[in-house]
Image (tube, grey):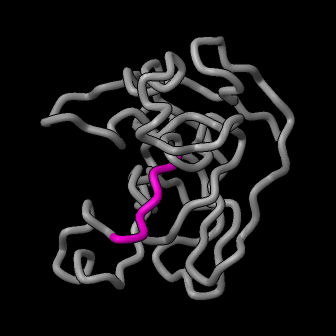
Amino acid sequence: MKAVRVHQYDKAPTLDDVPDPSVQGPHDVVVQVQGAGVCRTDLHIIEGQWAEKSGVSLPYVIGHENAGRVAEVGPAVTNVEVGDKAILHPLVTCGLCTACRAGDDVHCESSAFPGIDTDGGMAEYLLTSARSVVRLDPSLEPADVAAPADLDQGKVTGRAILVP
């Protein structure tokens, strides 16, 4: 698949061929990305401002404002089916730690943030968790709603674009 990856901070990302993600665990969901927002955070990542904070190894795929169609689901996924349109919450949480069980997912002990500390959605496909996938009304188009996946105090922080 094609993916936008940062190879070196303060250099333009490149469009690369990388392996397609696949379901590995029972709650995994692979989404065909049909919209990915560009956020100021993506620009800060490219500029290297998040290099130490994210701890990610380069190269990696950016993009944390994503929406698309469900392409594959793990055997325990019940909230979406293959073909559903979906928007993806940018924080992938376990649902089992003390913070998650208390409803404080933002402090999940084993969270991942696609596009920040794991491969993100500026790619043809994105691997995430069922907990992060929200089915869209069929009348909505993923490219029109991708950016609101990441809201900052009620304001959209990015703009939806189509991934090549």
Q: Residue furthest top?
A: 11
Q: Is residue 112 magenta?
A: yes
- Residue 68 horizontal side relative to residue 107, left or right: right
Residue for point 46% across, 36% down: 52
Q: Position of residue 3 (x, y in %)?
A: 73, 34
Q: Position of residue 102 (x, y in %)?
A: 16, 80
Residue for point 60% across, 72% down: 28
Q: Position of residue 130 (x, y in %)?
A: 49, 71
Of residues 90 and 47, the one drawn nearer to the viewer in this rendering: 47
Report the quarter where the N terminus lies: top right
* Range of residues picked out in magenta: 109-114
Q: Is residue 141 visible?
A: no
Question: How many circles with numbers are drawn on the protein?
Answer: 0
Q: Which quadrant of the structure image shows residue 22?
A: bottom right
Q: Residue furthest front?
A: 52
Report the quarter where the C terminus lies: top right
Q: Is residue 48 visible?
A: yes
Q: Position of residue 79 (x, y in %)?
A: 46, 76
Of residues 16 and 134, the one drawn nearer to the viewer in this rendering: 16
Of residues 138 and 43, the one drawn nearer to the viewer in this rendering: 43
Vertical order, 93 against 47 (above or below)? below
Task: Name the chief secondary structure element in magenta.
Answer: loop
- Residue 148 horizontal side relative to residue 46, left or right: left
Residue for point 36% across, 43% down: 149
Vertical order, 116 against 76 (above or below)? above
- Residue 15 horizontal side relative to residue 127, left or right: right
Q: Is residue 57 magenta?
A: no
Of residues 148 and 49, the one drawn nearer to the viewer in this rendering: 49
